[in-house]
Image (spheres, rainbow, N blue to C red):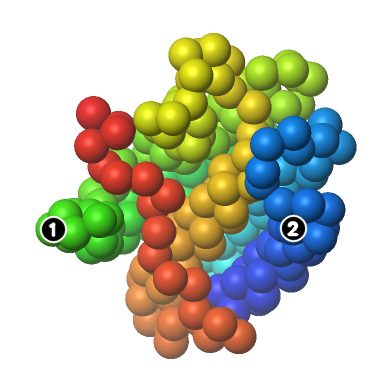
């Protein structure tokens, strides 16, 4: 496994999210009276996006492990070093199998086993929107958004009709939403689009930082994802 393969696997998984978004648009868009079946498409898109993020982190950890193993194999072998490496590899496999919640801290903990901290790479500058000055997206903002999308994923997985009121959801931030919609939002097409764009953003940054950590070129993309948090950082205060 290398970082290019990790990115390619992620891109292939996310193509199914793009397909679901296309299905939603073909079924009538985002206007009033949208059907329950289309809302289900939005739910499925978000679940797939989170799953693709989880698989990418597992692939990244594996790529880091494989590079460390290859580096050690190139050195003169010593008995104690080999035994220590075998124990470390066994511990790594156990941690990889237990990685089922790709939250910011769980992700960081897994990758730190290979000496790589992805969190510092989660920063960029984006438009403030509607004539406002640009804003700096910081790792703390990214961590909050990851956590919120995981909360949405869990609500969907548990079959909840409504979703927790979270800042990442359009209905919660929309001034035209009713109080009921803000307190018990359903998932809109814009939510699915925002979720997909967000995870593409942090995968791009994590992959670039991991490649730099390994001393390898940045992975290539058929189309480099733009960096998008999906909301203004002020909503995360």
Residue drawn at 57 percent across, 33 percent down: 150
Quadrant location, the C terminus: top left
Of badges 2 and 1, nearer the viewer stands 2
The residue drawn where x is 58% and y is 15% is 184
Percent x, y of residue 162: 66, 18
User: Of label 2 and label 1, which has the lower sequence position?
Assistant: 2
Q: Which residue is mark 2?
A: 25
172 relative to 92, above or below: above
The local secondary structure at tag 2 comes to: helix
The quarter of the picture where residue 11 lies is bottom right
Residue 133 is marked as 1
In the rendering, at what x and y percent does residue 194 appear? Answer: 52, 51
* Residue 82 or residue 11, whichever sits in front: 11
CA distance for labels 2 and 1: 32 Å
Compared with residue 154, is residue 105 higher up or lower down, i.e. above or below?
below
Mark 1: give few (<14), some (14-19) or many (20+) Cα within 10 Å: few
Q: Which mark is residue 77?
A: none
Query: Along the horizontal axis of the image, is 170 left or right of 59?
Result: left
Task: For the N terminus, give its image quadrant.
Answer: bottom right
Q: State left or right for residue 214 relative to residue 154.
A: left
**In this rendering, is residue 101 above or below 232?**
above
In which image quadrant can residue 66 be found? bottom right
Q: Residue at x 16, y 55 (%)?
A: 132
Image location (x, y in percent) of residue 70:
57, 76
User: Looking at the image, do the residues carrying marks 2 and 1 touch, with CB atoms under 8 Å apart?
Assistant: no
Q: Position of residue 13 (x, y in %)?
A: 74, 62
> What residue sits 43% from the left and 87% below the top?
217
């Amino acid at each position: 496994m290398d970082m290019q393969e990790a990115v390619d696997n992620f891109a292939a998984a996310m193509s199914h999210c793009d397909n679901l978004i296309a299905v939603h648009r073909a079924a009538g868009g985002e206007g009033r009276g949208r059907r329950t079946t289309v809302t289900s498409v939005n739910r499925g898109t978000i679940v797939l996006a989170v799953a693709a993020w989880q698989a990418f982190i597992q692939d990244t950890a594996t790529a880091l492990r494989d590079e460390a193993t290859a580096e050690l194999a190139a050195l003169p072998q010593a008995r104690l070093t080999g035994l220590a490496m075998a124990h470390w590899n066994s511990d790594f496999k156990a941690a990889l199998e237990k990685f089922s919640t790709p939250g910011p801290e769980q992700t960081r903990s897994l990758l730190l086993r290979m000496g790589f901290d992805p969190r510092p790479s989660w920063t960029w500058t984006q438009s403030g929107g509607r004539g406002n000055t640009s804003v700096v997206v910081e790792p703390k903002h990214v961590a909050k958004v990851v956590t919120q999308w995981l909360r949405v994923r869990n609500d969907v997985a548990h079959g909840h009709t409504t979703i927790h009121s979270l800042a990442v959801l359009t209905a919660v931030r929309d001034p035209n939403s009713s109080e009921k919609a803000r307190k018990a939002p359903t998932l809109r097409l814009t939510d699915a689009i925002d979720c997909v764009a967000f995870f593409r953003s942090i995968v791009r940054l994590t992959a670039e930082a991991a490649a730099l950590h390994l001393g390898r070129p940045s992975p290539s993309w058929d189309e480099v994802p733009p960096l998008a948090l999906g909301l203004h950082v002020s909503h995360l205060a």
